[in-house]
Each structure stands twice: as structure tokens, then as C-alpha cells.
Image: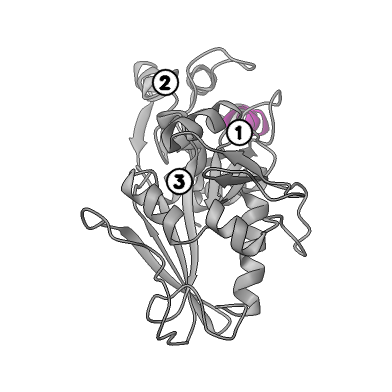
Amino acid sequence: MNWFERALDLAERGRGKVEDHPLVGAVLVRDGEAVGEGWYEFAGVKHAETIALEQAGERARGATLYVTLEPCSHHGLTPPCADAVVEAGVARVVVGALDPNPVVDGRGVERLREGGVDVEVLDSVEARRQNEAWRTWKSLGRPFVTVKVAVTLDGRVAVSGSRWVTGEESRRLVHELRAASDAVAVGMGTVRADAPRLDARGVGATRQPRRLAFGHGPLPAGSELELRSGPLEEELRALAADGVQSLLLEGGPTLATAFLAADLVDKLLVFVAPTVGGVGPRFVGDLAAPVPLSGLRATPVGADVLLEAYVHDV
């Protein structure tokens, strides 16, 4: 059993429930057996580590705690988890990632070590990316920005004679991405050309994202989009102040190029169709310098391929 992977899986149980908190999972292991498990779900409930400690009881003494995020060391709605871990007599803690929240940011690990606990910090890519939107929101004061585009094999964003570039499976996945995002946006060129709704349809969405248009209006009559006309960085900070942690950009080349040029893109999702378009605009315009990417991954989606890569790792 990979106990840290188990902690990551537990953390996912809070997905869509934690609001302005991070996903956290915890597993206490003693003599090769899990003696306590926990995950965080929503404000006001106990933290993952505390739940695992309570399950374990006296078996926590001398155990190893696997936790996806650094235990907190400050008094918030709940007491500090780091103190509880020390008091329970846990011998070792394996931490997936440090907490970028300025009120934690290494202090939890420091408190554990002061209490005599052996601490290993994995700096796990999986743990950081599990909370990628929250980490960016906390550390940079803006939403985590993902650019989503659908292109032909030669990088065109349209196919002559067809409404769609990619297949049905890719289009369904886009609706799932919308449902998982706090806000979805296009540029005014896309608004005028396509009058997009930008809502999540057919995927059982429990909530709808805020739907935005970046650029200068006016919006067409009857549009339900929210116009954002200020400088991009200022608009992102305003959205973050409203609790928007994740922003999905679905606009055309103008919007994608503007965000990339301003260094405000964190992740690219490029759906590539098995078609050579031959003519038409490409998904990004000219940039002053190349944009290096990391973590490139290719996943088949129906007949298409989804390319996923990071501009800024979290």
C-alpha cells in the first residue's frame, strides 16, 4: 500500500465542498496498518489530521502520519493541527507539500520538528497540483488561469464548413471543466461572433461558473455575461477578492495572446483534432519570446488528443 497515494485519494473526497480551503487528506499508519484516516470537507469541521488522530486514539503514539498538505500551526476556526500531532505522540510525519498560506508557510513543519517529530517534506507534484487553484489564489492573489483551446493538427482554431473543431467527447469534457471552474471567460470578439452561453450543460453540474467577457463593450442585448474592461491583472485581483480561485479562458487567439503576453496563464489545455485545417487563424498570435512549458501530458479523448502543460507550476 502506498500510504501517501491513499492520503491523496482521501483528499479528493472534499472536491467541490471545501470552498476557500484546500483539499487535505491524512492517513496514520502503525505497524504497517492504517489506524486512522481523515479528509477535510468544509469550513467549521475538524481538519483531516484531527479526524485521523481521533480515529487512531492511543494507536497514534509512535505512528507515521501521511498528510497531503503541511499541518497548520495557527488558531483559526479549529486549533492548530501541528500541536495535536505533537501531543498525540506521532513519531514521523510525511508532508506532501508546504502550505503557501502566509499564516502557515513552513511554520507547521517547524512546530512539528520543535516537538520532536521526524518530518519529511516530499514537495510532491501531485500534492501541489491537487490544490493548484487554491495555491495560486493564496500565494499570488489572483485566480489560477487555464487557457482551453480546440485546434486542428496544424494549429487552426476553425474548420471550414464545420461548427466544431473537435469531437463530442472533447466537447463534453469542456462542460465538465466549466463545472469545475469558478469562472469562465471569452473575449469580446468571441462574444460578437458566437454569443456563447459559457454555462456547464449535460454534466450534472451542482453550480454554474461566473461567466465573463474581457474587453470593451457594449455587450449584445440579452447577453448574460459579465463585462470586465479593466487591465487584466487588476481584473484578476478583483475576481480573486470575490473568491474566484480558478478561471477558464475559452476565447479566441486575441484573448489567449493577451494573457500569455502578460504572463497571466498558468496552464494550457489544447484539444487537438485529427484534421488539417489548412487555413484560418492559429490559437495564439505573436509573442515577444517563447513560453517554456512543463509537465506535458497527452491523453486520448475520443478521436482527439488532449495536450496538458503548465506555464507556471504551483
Question: What is the span of residues highlighted in magenta in the rendered image?
Answer: 49-57
Q: CA distance from mark 3 to mark 2?
A: 18 Å
Residue 90 bears which disc, if any? none
Q: In the rendered image, which quarter contains the C terminus?
A: top left
Determine if residue 63 is in view: no
The reply to whether the magenta stretch includes residue 22 is no
Question: x and y percent of residue 299 in the render?
Answer: 48, 73
Q: CA distance from mark 1 to mark 2?
A: 20 Å
Mark 1: few/some/many CA within 10 Å (<14, 14-19, 20+): many
Asked if the residues shown at circle 3 and circle 2 are in contact, with their CB atoms under 8 angstroms apart, the answer is: no
Q: Earlier in the sequence, mark 1 or mark 2?
A: 1
Against 123, residue 201 (above or below) is below
Three-letter code, disc 3: Ala
Mark 2: few/some/many CA within 10 Å (<14, 14-19, 20+): few
Residue 48 bears which disc, if any? 1
Three-letter code, disc 1: Ala
Residue at image mark 3: 127
Helix, strand or loop for disc 3: helix
Which secondary structure class fits the magenta region best?
helix
Residue at image mark 2: 102
Q: Earlier in the sequence, mark 1 or mark 3?
A: 1
Left or right: residue 293 versus residue 55 is: left
Q: Which residue extends farthest top? A: 75
**Residue 54: quarter of image:** top right
Against 139, residue 127 (above or below) is below
Left or right: residue 239 versus residue 201 is: left
Helix, strand or loop for disc 1: helix
Residue at x 56% of width, y 12% of height: 75
Residue at x 65% of width, y 34% of height: 19
Against 32, residue 170 (above or below) is below
Question: x and y percent of residue 180 in the render?
Answer: 64, 51
